[in-house]
Image (tube, rainbow, N blue to C red):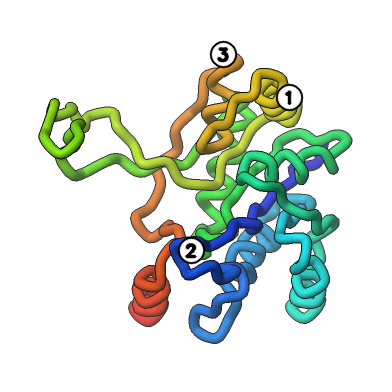
């Protein structure tokens, strides 16, 4: 069975000044190309589906041609939310072994993390990349209500990988129950599936604000 990656890049980029982030450049290369490259190189990924804004489909198709990406098989239009966008990509899959979902705005993912995530999804049916919280966590509004034990708390990242049938069931369940989650794992958890945690990296940042571009460029220079 094929392993298929869905790379979601249809966000509005509101905190970036409503700029389409996937075409912003880091070290002279569009952000989207970094994410695609790692999945393109991974021996465990057979095909890639890109989900982007409808008015950017032709531009993205040209980009994939320019960079000679061979595994990109579908470029589809996103929805109003990330969940709708990923579901649009998922609906293009007829059969698969593992489906791995990644945010296009996380350009510093690496092949080893992708492959660890997929291998654990093959073993445990569902796996996510997450980074342990190091800071003290407070709950409250204006004033502190409670200090929360940070042990066993994680910041969730992508990729997130799942057996195709499980992810499909989770998305259909969410749609039927009008549930909107903040990541794919939250949908899978709702149908009772345990999700394995894979250690993430502090470098696996999500490009959200202009300051993140500055940080990303400096990260590349240090590497």
- Taking the spot 47% from the left edge, 42% from the top edge, the residue there is 129
Horizontal and vertical percent for residue 153? 29, 32
Q: Quadrant of residue 152?
A: top left
Distance from Cα at disc 3 to Cα at disc 1? 14 Å
Q: Is residue 117 left or right of residue 54?
A: left
Q: Nearer the viewer, mark 1 or mark 2?
A: 1
Q: Mark 1 points at which residue?
A: 172
Q: Nearer the viewer, residue 219 or 63?
A: 63
Q: Nearer the viewer, residue 120 or 12?
A: 12
Relative to residue 207, is residue 184 depicted above or below? above
Relative to residue 35, is residue 153 depicted above or below? above
Q: Mark 3 points at which residue?
A: 192
Horizontal and vertical percent for residue 52? 71, 59
Badges 3 and 1: C-beta atoms under 8 Å apart? no
Horizontal and vertical percent for residue 105? 53, 61
Relative to residue 213, is residue 76 depicted above or below? above
List the single residue furthest toward the bottom. 28
Secondary structure state at the residue bearing disc 1? helix
Q: Earlier in the sequence, mark 3 or mark 1?
A: 1
Q: Is residue 60 left or right of residue 15?
A: right
Q: The N terminus appears in which quarter of the rendering? A: top right
- Taking the spot 18% from the left edge, 44% from the top edge, the residue there is 135
Q: Name the residue under label 2.
A: 108
Q: In this view, does 82 lie to the left or right of 99?
A: left
Q: Which of 203 and 90 is in front in this view?
A: 90
Distance from Cα at disc 1 to Cα at disc 2? 31 Å
């Amino acid at each position: 069975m094929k392993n298929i990656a869905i790379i979601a890049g249809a966000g509005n980029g509101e905190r970036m000044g409503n700029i389409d982030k996937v075409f912003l450049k880091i070290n002279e290369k569009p952000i989207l190309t970094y994410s695609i490259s790692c999945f393109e190189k991974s021996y465990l990924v057979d095909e890639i589906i890109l989900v982007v804004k409808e008015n950017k489909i032709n531009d993205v198709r040209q980009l994939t041609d320019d960079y000679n990406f061979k595994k990109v098989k579908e470029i589809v239009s996103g929805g109003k939310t990330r969940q709708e966008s990923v579901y649009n990509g998922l609906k293009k899959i007829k059969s698969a072994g593992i489906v791995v979902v990644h945010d296009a705005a996380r350009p510093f993912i690496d092949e080893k993390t992708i492959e660890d995530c997929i291998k654990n999804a093959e073993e445990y049916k569902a796996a996510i990349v997450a980074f342990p919280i190091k800071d003290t966590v407070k709950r409250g509004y204006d004033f502190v209500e409670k200090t929360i034990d940070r042990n066993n708390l994680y910041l969730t990242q992508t990729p997130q990988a799942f057996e195709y049938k499980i992810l499909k069931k989770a998305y259909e369940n969410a749609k039927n129950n009008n549930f909107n989650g903040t990541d794919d794992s939250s949908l899978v958890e709702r149908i009772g599936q345990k999700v394995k945690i894979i250690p993430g990296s502090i470098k696996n940042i999500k490009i959200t604000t202009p300051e993140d571009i500055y940080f990303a460029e400096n990260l590349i220079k240090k590497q």
